[in-house]
Amino acid sequence: MEWLFFALFALVALVGSAGVVLSRNAVHSALFLLLNFVAIALLYILLGAQFLAMAQIMVYAGAVVVLFIFVVMLIGNDTIDDFVARERPVLRVIAGILVAVFAAALVYVSFWAPNGRPNGAPTFGAVESVGELLFTRYLLPFELASVILLAAMIGAIILAARTKPPVGRPED
């Protein structure tokens, strides 16, 4: 039964990722990305990593997709049409090579890589194990990421404040 759910969620994730790449509308691509993130969260639940699944939903599906849609609505949808792959044949060759490498890796992982859960699987994705790793082994990268996000937020606020006209002054 678990295999059936895995196959269903994996198929939904593949359809979502194909929709992100193949959709010509940026809003539709963001919604397909949301579908992909939810399917991956369901795969985390099948692994027994409920904390990672909820973090996936809240951070990626909740914040990142909303941010993507906000940016698309802010800059407009016309910029997507400027990039046409037919006018750049080199990109088709590069994309074909990347698809072949990905397919080879998928076949290797599916048939020849060692199967089973990693060592320590009962605590994989649990809140205690994630917290212990995050605040011991990965403390410096975690803090650096928070500083970078804080700097980006301050920069966005400064840029947004410069573009607004002063409030209360009549226009000349």
Image: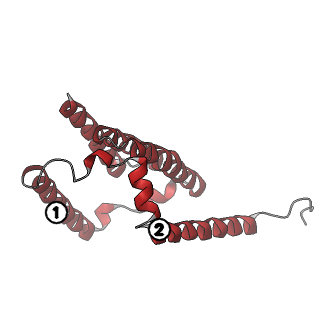
In this rendering, the label closer to the viewer, 2 or 1: 2
Q: Is residue 43 above or below residue 88?
A: above
Q: Is residue 37 left or right of residue 18?
A: right
Looking at the rendered structure, the secondary structure element under dot 2 is helix
Q: Is residue 102 left or right of residue 76?
A: left
Can residue 153 be seen here? The reply is: yes
Q: Residue at x 15, y 59 (%)?
A: 105
Q: Position of residue 88 (x, y in %)?
A: 30, 68
Q: Residue at x 54, y 53 (%)?
A: 67
Q: Amino acid at mark 1?
A: Val
Report which quarter residue 151 is drawn in. Answer: bottom right
Q: Is residue 24 above or below residue 87?
A: above
Q: Position of residue 65 (x, y in %)?
A: 49, 49
Report which quarter residue 159 is drawn in. Answer: bottom right
Q: Is residue 64 left or right of residue 50?
A: right
Numbered badge on residue 101:
1
Can residue 29 be seen here? The reply is: no
Q: Residue at x 33, y 52 (%)?
A: 21
Query: Residues under labels 2 and 1: Cα distance?
Result: 34 Å
Closest to the observer, 22 or 60: 60
Q: Residue at x 51, y 53 (%)?
A: 68
Q: Position of residue 31 (x, y in %)?
A: 44, 43
Q: Amino acid at mark 2?
A: Leu
Please state, as top left, top right, bottom left or bottom right, where the C terminus lies in the image: bottom right
Closest to the observer, 11 or 49: 49
At label 1, counting other C-alpha atoms closer than 10 Å, the crowd grade (few under 14, some 14-19, many 20 or more) is few
Q: Position of residue 93 (x, y in %)?
A: 20, 67
Q: Which residue is mark 2?
A: 139
Closest to the observer, 81 or 103: 103
